[in-house]
Image (cartoon, rainbow, N blue to C red):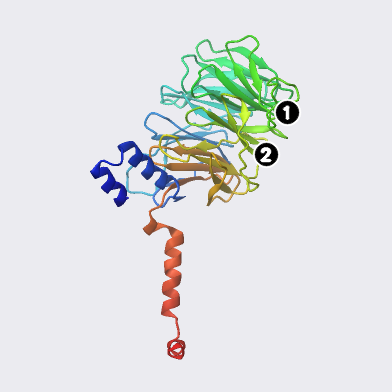
Amino acid sequence: MFAYLKRRERGTLRPVEFQRAESTKMAYSLGLSLDKEFAHNHRGGVTSLKLEKFEQRYLLSAGADGRCHIYDLADEKPRRQIEPIASISRADKHAFSISSVSWFPFDSGAFLTSSYDGTIRVWDTNLMQAAFVFDMEARVYCQAISPIATHTLVASAIAGAHVRLCDLKSCTNVHSLVGHKGSVLSVSWSPRDEHTLYSGGTDGTLRVWDIRRANACLASFDQHNNKDKLAETNRAHGRGINGLTPSSDGRFLISLGMDEKIRLWDTTTYTNMLVNYGTLWRNRFKAYMGAATSDNNDVWPPLLYVPSDDREVLVYDLMNGSLKRRLRGAYGRVTCVEKRTAFQELFSGSTDCEILAWAPIPPQRDPALLQEQADETFMDAWSSPESSEGEE
């Protein structure tokens, strides 16, 4: 860091380069937070986490118990456990597990939830009561609202062969996108084009849609890069696709398959980037799985954070697939992760009902380094004087 400061003083290092270097250093040193601990509030596994993007202050968590909690991450009170500042009451909760949550993109005064009880609900954050309920008449695996759109459409992945669009203004189901041959497991909007939507299904197909068109499907991604983008034989994965995450700039899309493969796609050419992420990752369940990426402007090379069924979060180099870190601490299957880019922090939820906070660990507080130093001190204290004399 001091070398960077010297270069910054001499004017040989631009401020943006200095910021990126420090952010990258912090992002690559993640460990279990020594300062943040979340209170145990969910009575079922944590299924989804979402951070509002304005202040990156309020964290929304959802669980298999059908309830949601909101945590204030800026709470500076001298206590380690972070308690929720608002919660959905047991009387108003979903009948079954919540599958995904989303903040309203332009106002933290509202958020959305989808559930296996067949509904998508719009909630008033101040009252923690449902303002409107969409009855989808089928299990909802995931919902998504565009982070940049001027429209108010919510896309839903349901136990049916079509993607259903709901309009928050008219409070009706306005359109269905037909093309999948089985249930739709995941949906995600493009962060750079408000009319582009991605969907993945149990048939192993990953489709891109332009919601303005009558013939809405633009392409079906193929792992072998078939030149015919709409061929019926195109398959992105060998099994269902239960996770879709775009990169921060929208140039790439990450798909998570139940064939336990992670694939990186170019969203301009609709081609497989052929990045090998290894064979450590585990994904055996049909439930939606939310991954996260670092901001390309802050961290380079960018990082990919993927929850895994074997109770850990795997951190990869997004562009070359090399494994950078294995974050272990959960006692159950990790189901979701959420990145707090302004502080280079990460939050993970798991089936053991816990939310874990991961933060940059200074070298002097790194548990692995402290343990190594303690072992050296122990060995020095118990070294035999006779053995030292014999060596002389």
Q: Residues within 10 Å of mark 1 (few under 14, many from 20)?
A: many
Q: Secondary structure at mark 1?
A: loop
Res 230 visible: yes
Q: Amino acid at mark 2?
A: Phe
Please tell me in which quadrant of the rendered image residue 27 appears.
Answer: top left
Task: Indicate which disc residue 15 carries.
Answer: none
Provide the residue designation for mark 1: 203
Residue 165 drawn above or below residue 308: above
Pick the front one: 194 or 58: 194
Q: Is residue 250 left or right of residue 184?
A: left
Secondary structure of the residue carrying numbered label 2:
loop
The answer to whether 234 is drawn above or below residue 351 in the figure is: above
Disc 2 crowd rating (10 Å Cα; few below 14, some 14-19, many 20+) is few
Residue bearing the label numbered 2: 285
Amino acid bearing label 1: Asp
Quarter holding residue 362: bottom left
Where's residue 376, x and y in %?
44, 72
Going from N to C along the chain, the mark reached first, 2 or 1, is 1
Percent across and percent down for residue 111 are: 48, 25
Image x and y of residue 283, in percent: 65, 41
Q: Is residue 358 above or below residue 286?
A: below
Q: Nearer the viewer, mark 2 or mark 1?
A: 1
Judge left or right: residue 14 versus residue 354. Answer: left
Residue 19 position within the rendered picture, expressed as x and y whole percent measured from the top left: 34, 40
Q: Which quadrant is home to the C terminus? A: bottom left
Residue farthest toward the left in the current orientation of the protein: 9
Side (left or right) of 286 relative to 81: right
Q: Nearer the viewer, residue 157 or 92?
A: 157
Foreground: 66 or 16?
Answer: 16
Residue 75 seen in the figure: no
Query: What's the CA distance linking mark 2 and mark 1?
Result: 15 Å
Write the residue at 52% across / 37% down: 292
